[in-house]
Amino acid sequence: WFIRCIAGICVNDNLSSPNHIDIRPHFINTLSSACAEYNAPAGKVSVKWERQDGCIMLDIHCAEGVKGEIIPPDGFYFKDCSARLPLSSGVWRVYKK
């Protein structure tokens, strides 16, 4: 539950591949941070989010063979105002509308 619902590591939701992982974190108001990891056949995926300076810092590391998207909860967006990004390793600022 924590891995899927809080950290947002959603494995193979569309039943296409065990290496298809969408990151859909839930930024629960009573938590200041969360982290989790999952070992997919193509390698490890880890997600950490933390409240910082009025935004959420979302830190994702994923193996090269893992594909999917990063999708923040409704009402949140990335710096470029997009609501989703292709899954890749990196750190993103997520803002609340």
Image (cartoon, rainbow, N blue to C red):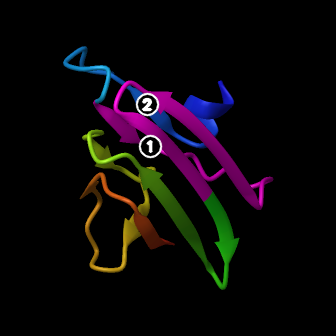
Q: In this view, does 50 lie to the left or right of 30?
A: left
Above or below, comparing residue 3 to residue 69 in the picture: above
Q: Quadrant of the C terminus?
A: bottom left
Q: For the residue labelled by badge 2, is the local secondary structure a helix, a strand or a loop?
A: strand
* Rendering coords of residue 2 (x, y %): 68, 31
Q: Does the magenta stretch include residue 47?
A: yes
SS at badge 1:
loop
Tally of numbered tags: 2
Q: Which residue is found at the position 28% from the left and 56% from the top?
A: 84
Q: Over which residues does the magenta segment extend? A: 20-48
Which three-letter amino acid code belongs to the residue tagged 2? Cys
Q: What residue type is labelled 1?
A: Arg
The residue positioned farthest toward the left in the image shown: 16
Drawn side of residue 85 relative to residue 21, left or right: left
For the point 37% across and 46% down, the residue is 63
Please report the residue visible at 46 percent of the width from the left and 55 percent of the height from the top: 61
**Is residue 93 depicted above or below 34 in this figure?**
below
Task: State the image coordinates of residue 44 (x, y, percent, origin top left).
Answer: 48, 39
**Does the rendering let one see residue 97?**
no
Residue 45 lies, in percent from the top left, at: 47, 42
Q: Can residue 31 be seen in the rendering of this structure?
A: yes
Viewer-proximal residue among 44 and 16? 44
Q: Name the residue under label 1.
A: 24
Q: Nearer the viewer, residue 73 or 71?
A: 71
Classify the position of the N terminus by image quarter.
Answer: top right
* Relative to 30, residue 9 above or below: above
Mark 2: few/some/many CA within 10 Å (<14, 14-19, 20+): some
Write down the residue under mark 2: 10
**Residue 46 image position (x, y, % from top left):** 54, 47
